[in-house]
Image (cartoon, helix red, strand yellow):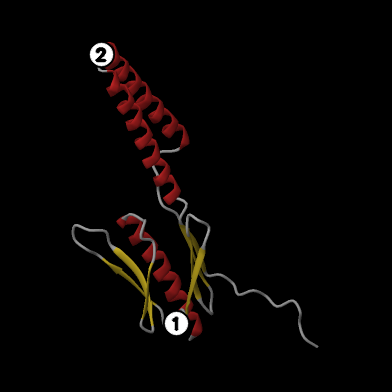
Amino acid sequence: MTDSTAKAPEAHFSAVLLPHRSLGRKGFITLMSVISGVSFLTGIAFYLKGAWPVFGFFGLDVLLVYGAFKLNYRAARLYETVELTDEQLTVTRIHPSGRAESWSFNPYWVRLELEEIDNAANRLSLRSHGRELRIGTFLSDDEKRGFAHALGAALYDVRGSRI
């Protein structure tokens, strides 16, 4: 008789990596209101002095700032999940479009590398059997160090439990 209640492998480590955005929705509305108000008042001043075409350019500036922030917020929807079990280390990247990519590594063979680079962003990557996957590219250098330490400790624990 077979056991139909097979247990899923226990996760030793699980993390969701999210890009940081310091300006929330309320802050964005406040900033756009201030920019719009200043542009409108400045545009009115130019209009009253007879330079009416300038008024339209102030509106264009507001639209460009708005568009840049919207693109930035769209890019912030990117995130990565990292899950470590006894059998595998799985990294799943969810793109802003909703498309998901997933990579799996054997936790015994995978090597976690944090490359510290002067005057540039550090690189955090997983390497195994000639393959390399850069992870957490949107994290700050301190966040990469902290994540590398936590994942490295979890990999060490998993490898120790196999012996």
CB within 8 Å, label 1 to label 2? no
Q: Is residue 28 above or below residue 78?
A: above
Left or right of residue 14, residue 20 in this image: left
Task: Report the residue at 45% width, 48% height from top.
Answer: 74
The foreground one among 36 and 93 is 36
Q: Name the residue under label 2.
A: 50
Task: Report the residue at 50% width, 84% height from top.
Answer: 162
Q: Residue furthest top?
A: 48
Which type of secondary structure does the marked residue at label 1 adopt?
loop
Q: In this view, does 157 lie above or below 80?
A: below
Q: Name the residue under label 1.
A: 108
Question: Residue 114 occupies which quadrant of the picture?
Answer: bottom left
Q: Which mark is residue 65?
A: none
Q: Label 1 vs label 2: CA separation?
A: 74 Å
Left or right of residue 3, residue 43 in this image: left
Which type of secondary structure does the marked residue at label 2 adopt?
loop
Q: Closer to the camera: disc 1 or disc 2?
A: 2
Residue 43 lies, in percent from the top left, at 31, 19
Task: Report the residue at 41% width, 79% height from top.
Answer: 110
Residue 13 lies, in percent from the top left, at 50, 67
At label 2, the amino acid type is: Gly
The foreground one among 94 and 156 is 94
